Image: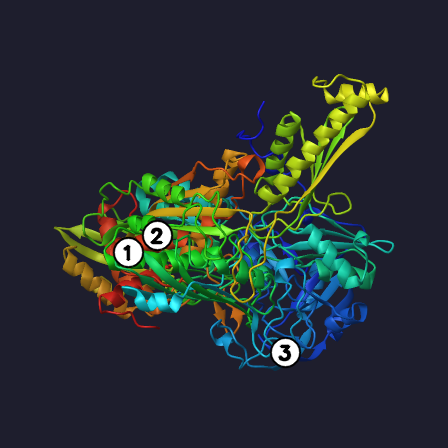
């Protein structure tokens, strides 16, 4: 590692001011679990790192806001999120996903904001939060803006964040009675980056699924909602024919990439199968996780 | 108290788990330089120029060294155990991506690393050959000149085939295979392939050379200290005693650290700079150091009406990569067992060690045998299925039993092949009904496989047992304990002979100034060879103690403690007794024409596995419900350590079976990191049972023999056989990824997946 400057601002405002919209070698670091690997591999050589550890503690808070939504501060660690009582009660799908996200050593250090801003399509939090209808809050030097989570992503390792913007929080709306599931499908070993991630959520009314969200990750260049699959599910009962149709629709719609996890053709098959399994898992709800 | 057979924990466990054990990685010497390696980016090419100017002038860089600099120090700077074919740094040509071309030296490893980024090399690229079958044709020649080393007594004849890529071809002819095949009732022929994978000890290669006054000390993570000493001395034209090789504990080896790896490079660099030089590879660089041979194995069997295999022909092609390393030995030693542990009268074997433009291949936990068992046990299972015979019953009918000649002509003794097969059948409840699931998308099946291996021969081990004047005992040996528990086993043997506890015996780490010769810690040879030497050395010490007692005037047959004997003899706590022994088993080299020998190995290793699997037919995912491992290790010295050797080997082979594969694109490894080269994690380990069958190796120390590799033999074919049993599809190539299984299922169903 080549020497660089490390700055430890004590406020969010100060941290943002230290960033430079035109200088890619200046970056903020929260948990550092991804950035350090990139630096070790020589993929990223910083001139200055803005360490966020000392900014106001409120940015690490996880709490229900006045609108009844769960607001997760970007500096919360993944472990804190995993163990949070509100998360366990309201978003069991999220708590479950976290237990299979990397390992405890990483979860103890990695921060929610970093996990969202990294932009690697293989990560677990973005698809789950996208399926939960989460919004991400972004602060720049002048203004704050809010985006639906899936709109944060522009491409492979690419987000719409300006270089002098930071994610400050992610907000998950109250959606009582909605079913949700996330399927992390690995193709090589059990503990691995997924070859495919499928996250779904939907309401159930009179035996029919309402307002479904179907999100694909890992196999595509970015976290992507599958409009055609959502359409196939909306208003239908979760029977074999409907789920097969939704799987076909997603497989036809998704722009799937080949990589070391498998060919595009194989991952398309996985998607076809796992849309169905994800809906079934959501219906089983808090029941034990279906394997792989 | 009996020491042999005691289930004691390994002697070094406390030091290891408390972080007190020494490893070469920890060592820093005053004035030490760190070397970082600039590597070839092309698979095959003539070196046109190496521009080191920018690196040399980088502040903090001490020196940049290329192959030509080394040639000024050593006129013929080539090393290797079978061929002297590997240059210390590339000379004239590069032969694989990742080959070391230059080294940047600096006191700060980060500066050295930065210097490497500033080097630019130009090559005239040559056509490359990657596939072992393509390498059989001489269109691309990896080496224009072959340089046989003549190191091994058994490989003295090897010359290589000039104008080809064949480093060694081994042929065995027993009976008349063609005639028997023509008369057979049924003939079966299949081709199986294995992939390139690697050892991946969690401690990557690391070595330090420290120049002294007309001598050199090398600290290294290596499995063959005596060989390193001899080879470095040869390169410098020195007597052996000017080179000292010291080896602390290893963080794993598995064959990745046999013979010279980084040692010649750090030795040359330290002689050029007169400074200590350390090179420690990153995990990514290990992918360019040494690998396991990819293979293609064509196997054909003729079976008579009674279901007996009457003829088998085997053609095995070993993809050795750019440098021969130990490949020729793998080709021959494993080659003659290629027909499997079956009693077959007519056998022909052709085994070829081939040069290609890949990372060199060596021996990996099994010395080539797992590649062979993969083919012959998959093939054997396919035959049984075709004949409608139960796979266990089919093996029983054909199995090779003690007293019968193996393919080489050597009569089998103390090889519990039938016992391993029966142990597997019993543990698998083979005769009971098997739950195949509900006929839905999850299908269950089971399979077994057995394999055997000859020990590397002829090899020598020497041991020294030193009894101090207080009776405390120190053992000197050059076996490297890399986690297999050899120090503990030897302490138990010494304790048994000299009637002390194993825990009280001090075992000295390999240091060639101090510890005597050993051929190397490889091929599961240590417990048998060094174990015998240690036993004999301890017996020698015991005899000398008795002589000392007689000199001291003590009556014969009394059991005075050693300390009292010394005191009586020397009048105070003084003196010592040195017991020594060397052990080299008898051996007869196979006939060059027929490949036959009536004394081809001192002992046989036997291992097998049984697997129950569940296949998700919608995704190809295979869940291993149960893995049973059984092996013959003679009478175990330490049953607990032996069982963990068995399970550890099985888990390692599980990775080679299910997920591990080096992916190549134009000679470049595209997954050279643990993020994309996947070894099994705890979530991949199936429920396992590990059984040591009741057996005895009569020529072994206290009836014992080696076991480190036996757990690898049966795992891959047992799983493929179980998948076939579950789904009706056969996987012919490793690894058995979920995608490979789904593709096979879909092809069988007439709906193949497209190739994108």
Look at 48% across and 45% down and name the residue there.
B413
Instruction: From the viewer's perspective, tell me whether residue B267 is left or right of residue A168.
Output: right
**Residue A289 vertical placement versus A37 (above, below):** above
The furthest residue to the left = A206
Question: Upstream in the sequence, badge 1 or badge 3?
Answer: 3
Instruction: From the viewer's perspective, tell me whether residue B105 is left or right of residue A280.
Output: right
- The answer to the question of whether label 1 and label 3 lie on touching residues, with beta carbons closer than 8 A, is no
Chain letter for the residue marked with disc 3 in the picture: B
Look at 30% across and 59% down and name the residue there.
B383
The furthest residue to the right = B213
Q: Report the label total.
A: 3
For label 3, the SS is loop
Residue situated in front as seen by the camera: B700 or A79: B700
Q: Residues within 10 Å of mark 1 (few under 14, many from 20)?
A: some
Report how far apart the C-alphas of labels 1 and 3 lie in the structure.
48 Å
Report how far apart the C-alphas of labels 2 and 1 lie in the structure.
8 Å
| Residue at the spot of label 3 | B144
Residue A21 image-quadrant placement: bottom right
Query: Residue B595 location in percent, x, y?
Result: 52, 62
| Residue at the spot of label 1 | B307
Q: Residues within 10 Å of mark 3 (few under 14, many from 20)?
A: few
For label 2, the SS is helix
Is disc 2 in the same subunit as disc 1?
yes
Query: Residue B441 location in percent, x, y?
Result: 22, 54
| Residue at the spot of label 2 | B398
Chain letter for the residue marked with disc 2 in the picture: B
Q: Inspect this view and state whether residue A201 appears.
A: no
């Amino acid at each position: 590692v080549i020497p660089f400057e490390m700055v430890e601002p004590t406020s969010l405002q100060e941290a943002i001011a230290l960033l430079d919209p035109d200088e890619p070698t200046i970056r903020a670091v929260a948990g550092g679990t991804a950035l350090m690997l990139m630096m070790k591999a020589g993929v990223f050589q910083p001139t200055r790192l803005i360490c966020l550890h000392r900014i106001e503690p409120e940015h690490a808070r996880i709490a229900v806001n006045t609108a009844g939504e769960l607001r997760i501060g970007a500096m919360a660690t993944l472990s804190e999120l995993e163990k949070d009582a509100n998360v366990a009660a309201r978003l069991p799908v999220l708590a479950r996903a976290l237990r299979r996200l990397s390992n405890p050593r990483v979860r103890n250090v990695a921060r929610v904001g970093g996990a969202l801003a990294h932009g690697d399509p293989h990560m677990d939090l973005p698809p789950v939060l996208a399926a939960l209808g989460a919004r991400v809050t972004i602060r720049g030097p002048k203004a704050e803006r809010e985006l639906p989570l899936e709109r944060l992503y522009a491409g492979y390792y690419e987000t719409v964040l300006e270089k002098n913007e930071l994610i400050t929080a992610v907000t998950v709306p109250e959606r009582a009675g909605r079913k949700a599931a996330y399927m992390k499908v690995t193709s090589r070993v059990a503990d691995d980056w997924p070859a495919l991630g499928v996250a779904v959520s939907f309401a159930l009314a009179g035996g029919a699924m309402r307002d479904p969200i179907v999100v694909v990750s890992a196999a595509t260049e970015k976290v992507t909602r599958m409009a055609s699959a959502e359409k196939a599910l909306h208003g239908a009962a979760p029977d074999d024919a409907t789920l097969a149709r939704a799987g076909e629709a997603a497989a036809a719609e998704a722009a799937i990439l080949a990589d070391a996890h498998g060919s595009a053709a194989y991952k398309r098959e996985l998607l076809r199968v796992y849309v169905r399994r994800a809906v079934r898992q959501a219906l089983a709800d808090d029941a034990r996780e279906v394997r792989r | 108290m009996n020491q042999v057979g005691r289930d004691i924990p390994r002697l070094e466990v406390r030091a290891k788990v408390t972080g007190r054990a020494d490893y070469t990685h920890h060592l820093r010497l005053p004035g030490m330089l760190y070397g970082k390696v600039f590597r070839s980016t092309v698979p095959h090419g003539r070196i046109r120029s190496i521009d080191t100017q920018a690196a040399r002038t980088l502040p903090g860089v001490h020196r940049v060294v290329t192959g030509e600099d080394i040639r000024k120090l050593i006129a013929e700077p080539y090393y290797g155990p079978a061929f002297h074919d590997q240059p210390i740094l590339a000379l004239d040509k590069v032969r694989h991506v990742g080959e070391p071309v230059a080294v940047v030296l600096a006191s700060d490893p980060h500066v050295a690393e930065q210097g490497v980024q500033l080097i630019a090399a130009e090559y005239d690229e040559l056509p490359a050959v990657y596939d072992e079958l393509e390498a059989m044709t001489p269109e691309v020649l990896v080496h224009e000149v072959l340089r046989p080393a003549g190191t091994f007594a058994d490989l003295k004849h090897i010359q290589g085939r000039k104008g080809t890529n064949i480093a060694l071809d081994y042929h065995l002819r027993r009976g008349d295979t063609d005639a028997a095949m023509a008369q057979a009732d049924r003939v079966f022929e299949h081709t199986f392939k294995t992939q390139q994978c690697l050892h991946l000890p969690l401690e990557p290669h690391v070595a330090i050379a420290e120049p002294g006054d007309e001598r050199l000390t090398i600290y290294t993570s290596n499995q063959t200290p005596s060989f390193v000493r001899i080879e470095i001395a040869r390169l410098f034209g020195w007597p052996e005693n000017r080179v000292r090789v010291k080896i602390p504990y290893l963080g794993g080896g598995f064959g990745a650290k046999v013979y010279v790896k980084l040692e010649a490079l750090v030795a040359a660099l330290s002689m050029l700079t007169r400074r200590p030089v350390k090179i420690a590879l990153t995990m990514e660089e290990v992918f360019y150091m040494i690998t396991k041979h990819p293979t293609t194995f064509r196997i054909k069997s003729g079976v008579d009406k009674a279901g007996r295999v009457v003829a088998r022909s085997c053609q095995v092609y070993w993809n050795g990569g750019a440098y021969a390393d130990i490949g020729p030995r793998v080709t021959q030693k494993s080659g003659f067992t290629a027909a499997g542990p079956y009693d077959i009268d007519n056998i022909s074997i052709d085994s070829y060690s081939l040069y290609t433009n890949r990372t060199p291949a060596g021996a990996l936990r099994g010395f080539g045998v797992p590649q062979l068992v993969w083919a012959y046990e998959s093939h054997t299972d396919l035959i049984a299925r075709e004949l409608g015979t139960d796979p266990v019953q089919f093996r029983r009918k054909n199995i090779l039993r003690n007293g019968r000649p193996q393919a080489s002509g050597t009569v089998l003794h103390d090889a519990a092949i039938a016992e391993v097969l029966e142990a597997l059948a019993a543990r698998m409840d083979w005769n009971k009904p098997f739950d195949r699931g509900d006929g839905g998308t999850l299908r269950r099946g089971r399979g077994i496989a057995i394999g055997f291996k000859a020990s590397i021969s002829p090899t020598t081990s020497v041991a020294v047992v030193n009894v101090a004047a207080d009776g405390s005992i120190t053992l000197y040996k050059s076996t490297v304990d890399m986690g297999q528990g050899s120090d503990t086993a030897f302490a138990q043997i010494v304790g048994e002979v000299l009637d002390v506890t194993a825990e009280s015996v001090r075992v000295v780490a390999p240091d060639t100034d101090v510890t005597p010769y050993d051929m190397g810690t490889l091929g599961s040879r240590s417990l048998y060879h060094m174990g015998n030497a240690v036993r004999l050395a301890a017996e020698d010490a015991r005899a000398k103690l008795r002589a000392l007692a007689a000199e001291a005037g003590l009556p014969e047959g009394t059991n005075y403690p050693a300390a009292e004997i010394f005191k009586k003899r020397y009048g105070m706590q003084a003196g010592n007794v040195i017991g020594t022994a060397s052990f080299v088993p008898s051996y007869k080299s196979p006939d060059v024409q027929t490949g036959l020998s009536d004394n081809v190995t001192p002992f046989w290793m036997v291992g097998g596995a049984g697997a129950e699997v569940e296949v998700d037919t919608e995704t190809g995912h295979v869940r291993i419900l149960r893995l049973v491992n059984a092996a013959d290790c003679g009478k175990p010295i330490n049953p607990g350590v032996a069982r963990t050797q068995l399970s550890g080997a099985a888990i390692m082979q599980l990775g080679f079976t299910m997920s591990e594969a080096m992916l190549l694109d134009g000679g470049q490894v595209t997954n050279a990191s643990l993020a994309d080269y996947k070894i099994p994690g705890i979530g991949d380990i199936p429920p396992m049972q590990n059984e040591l069958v009741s057996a005895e190796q009569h020529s072994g120390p206290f009836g014992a023999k080696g076991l480190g590799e036996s757990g690898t033999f049966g795992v891959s074919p047992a799983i493929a056989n179980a998948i076939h049993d579950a789904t009706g599809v056969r996987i012919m190539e490793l690894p058995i990824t979920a995608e490979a299984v789904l593709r096979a299922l879909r092809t069988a169903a007439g709906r193949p997946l497209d190739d994108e």
